[in-house]
Image (cartoon, rainbow, N blue to C red):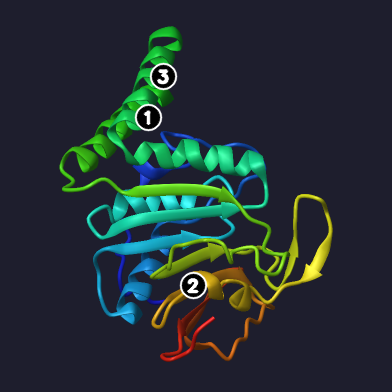
Amino acid sequence: MIYKYCENGNFEDFASGRVIAHRAGYPNFPVRLAQEIFGRCLSYLGRSDHICLYDPCCGGGYLLTILGFLHYGRIETIMASDINDDAIQLARENLSLLEIKGLEERIQKLDHLWSLYNKPSHREALDSAAHLLDILTNATHEIKREAFLADLLLKGSLDSRDFKADIILTDVPYGNLVRWQNGNTESVNLLEQLLPVTKAGTVVAICSDKSQKFQSDHFQRVDKQTVGKRLFQIYKKVEGKTE
């Protein structure tokens, strides 16, 4: 794949488990690929500021948190949802790093670990946290954030939400057939489920395995790329269509 919007660089400050918290069972996402997909989404959106970004299957919020740091000046609001309460708690913890208070609390914990164990990994984490703090202190605004429970298997689960996303970006391992916390599986038309939080021009990027297909008369596919075992597809809400 040709990267148009992100050169190959050093993203160690964003490594899962270093400053951004990680727990077993929550997948990571390649930082460079996240950057590339977000850059493509911006190009299809046609603007690059005051962005409302939403991940409907956020897991621990890793993807949203790294994009928040990397595009702090562009993103105005981050919305996150998941079916799993533990995931939402972790997502809130990670998204709190996008404000100075939350990141400083994380730095205090890392500094305590460094003083106790003197591990190089803790020193490296402190260095990375300092770099992330520079991003926040130089920012002109604070990103608004909300993480909430939502079961996308339930029709209308987003009907009561009062936001409209500019970009929806999510990693869906099971695609149209989503396996939730309770182990049940049902056919899900993800694009249709997202309609209540979209508007004309909303861009939706879905990462899945290569077998997945997503269709809706409300959206036009504008991009499709495979990267290793991953497939990402980008859709744009058709002008004039409503939910």
Q: Amino acid at mark 2?
A: Ala
Point out the residue furthest to the right here: 184
Q: Which SS class for mark 2?
A: strand
| CB under 8 Å between discs 1 and 3 | no
100 over 25 or under it: above or below: above
The residue depicted at 45 percent of the width and 89 percent of the height is: 238
Q: Amino acid at mark 3?
A: Lys
Q: Which SS class for mark 1?
A: helix
126 over 169 or under it: above or below: above
How packed mark 1 is, by other alpha carbons closer than 10 Å (few <14, some 14-19, many 20 or more), is many
Residue where numbered disc 3 is placed: 109
Residue where numbered disc 1 is placed: 125
Q: How far is the residue under mark 1 from the one under mark 3?
A: 11 Å
Give the quarter of the figure containing the C terminus.
Answer: bottom right
**Residue 57 in the image: x percent, y percent?**
59, 58
226 over 180 or under it: above or below: below
Residue where numbered disc 2 is placed: 205
**Residue 123 in the image: x percent, y percent?**
35, 23
Q: Which is nearer the N-term, disc 2 or disc 1? A: 1
Give the foreground label among 2 and 1: 2
